[in-house]
Amino acid sequence: MSSETETGVSGGTDLEILDTTLRDGAQGEGISFSVQDKLAVVRALDDLGVAWIEAGNPGSNPKDAEFFSLVRGLSLGHSRLCAFGPTRKPGIKAADDPQIRRLLEANTEGVVIFGKSWDLHVTEVLRVSLEENLAMIFETTAFLTAQGRKVFFDAEHFFDGWKANPGYALSTLETALKAGAKTMVLCDTNGGSFPDDMTAGVGAVLQKYEKSGVDVGIHAHNDMGLAIANALAAVKGGCRHVQGTLVGFGERCGNTSLAALIPSLELKWGLRCLPRGKLPLIAETTRRVAEIANIPVPGAMPYVGSSAFSHKGGMHTDGVLKVRRSFEHIDPALVGNNRHLLMSEVGGRSAVAERAKKIDPSFTKDHPVIAAIAEKLKTLEAEGWAFEGADASFEILVRRELSRHTGRSEESRRSLFKILAYRVVSEHPTGETIACSHAWVKVWVEGKDEIAAAEGDGPVNALDGALRRALTRFYPELEQVRLSDYKVRVIDGNAATAAKVRVLIESTDGVKTWSTLGVSEDIIDASRAALVDSIEYKLIGDIERKFRAYL
């Protein structure tokens, strides 16, 4: 691998990372960033230490223009910004093109210019001559370079163009290079190339331009599910600039997921992509950017997903607890993730014991209590309970079973609260009156009874509101708790309307998120069980944190 001096890559890294979440990522279906969202993404990527942030096209819409005027007020510690735009329009000077002027007005250190490198696009899409396309590339790049901008040339459709007409595809790169471009980015715009195509295309470019002092980069799309593999092949072939989006979303099937690529480059190949000490932030930052985009991080996403280090099978769990590397290719902490032992009937006593140790460190997998909990778990799973997605409910189950089998008093749990009675009524009036639900609940807390009622959009919403209203008098911290997700699954469809249902709810207090579940033939009662577990988990956690702080 080449050194930093040889490649010209700056910032003390071996590879230069450009994140295009705010440009290519924003073109993904269902993604819509507000101006404040875009500013928040910039802060997150800067905290992670990404070298370049492609912040959008200032000539495409008023929102991006407003963003570029506001982002100048941010004080960034690591990242530099670049604006994105096309080459000048045919038949006019670059200085007279309104879009080129807006790129300058964005006042970013870098500018990404995309130009056609596939002759099909030149003649059939742009409908200009091959010579005019080269002139558009040269004049745009030269004009922006003369204005003090660092120009990245995105050779759009490079690999398709190189396969169709290699001489012309390479001439577009040479034109940008002569005009002053500092980085030539080879784009697999349609996402239809294989890793072998990367090796051959990158090799041809480096053979011709390796001594020019220019960096060669890769921009891959995921239309065949090969974006990461193609990016790795390009880096192995000599690319020192990599573009992608942190979470992977983008046009059509998305872009190279940087959160899945960067750890492989750093941990497997020893190539530094982020400033020293930043890699453990990548899982948290990925969740942060996904939350801003209002999408979930895929559970199975490598390195940073919630399932990336999850273990369910008993033999796997036992093995990883004895020797981490037996079933984990890296330490989860290196990327800021955690090992997750899934609780199920196939999990085994090792997994149960490991979870129980968080409550009582004295328990081992051979303790009779652990065996009893494992058997209880199998029984409940046979009845339709599924704890692998409801860690908080499993912890509540463990606490109850430990109390039952060790003879310890359950009073500490009971003293929190107990539902004495509840009623839920749904109304569906005719006419213009909107349907609504009402709930009434009576709880016992600290020797006192409390009754509360609430109206909701549905029976579960009403019950949730009434229960919180009754308990908030005693536990004001519940004001911060809200349901962030609610799912219902029919366990046995053959039983029709008499079937058991499993309710899974996700709750958050703004800092922590946890999941609980309930199972019953009555959807309201299943929801009630999940709600009770959620509130108990929150209150027990707060009590234990206060106790540890007191000690």
Image: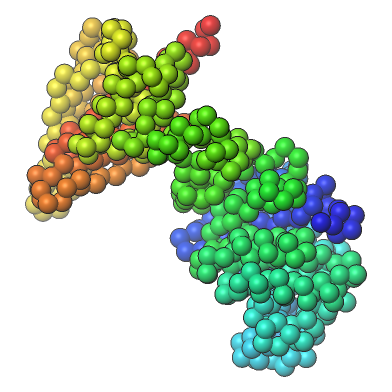
533, 1: nearer the viewer: 1
Left or right: where 316 falls relative to 416:
right
Q: Is residue 499 visible in the rendered structure shown here?
A: yes
Q: Is residue 344 above or below residue 14?
A: above
Left or right: where 14 falls relative to 411:
right
547, 495: nearer the viewer: 495
x, y percentage for residue 171? 80, 83
For residue 524, which quarter of the picture?
Answer: top left
Q: Is residue 343 above or below residue 207?
A: above
Q: Residue at x 39, y 35 (%)?
A: 314
x, y percentage for residue 198? 68, 71
Labels in figure, total: 0
Q: Residue at x 14, y 33 (%)?
A: 424
Q: Residue at x 72, y 61 (%)?
A: 235
Q: Residue at x 64, y 81 (%)?
A: 160
Q: Is residue 79 visible in the rendered structure shown here?
A: no
Left or right: where 205 falls relative to 493:
right
Left or right: where 95 falls relative to 449:
right
Q: Is residue 242 above or below residue 158?
A: above
Coloring scheme of the render? rainbow
40, 188: nearer the viewer: 188
x, y percentage for residue 131? 78, 91
x, y percentage for residue 299? 46, 47
Q: Is residue 114 above or below residue 493?
A: below
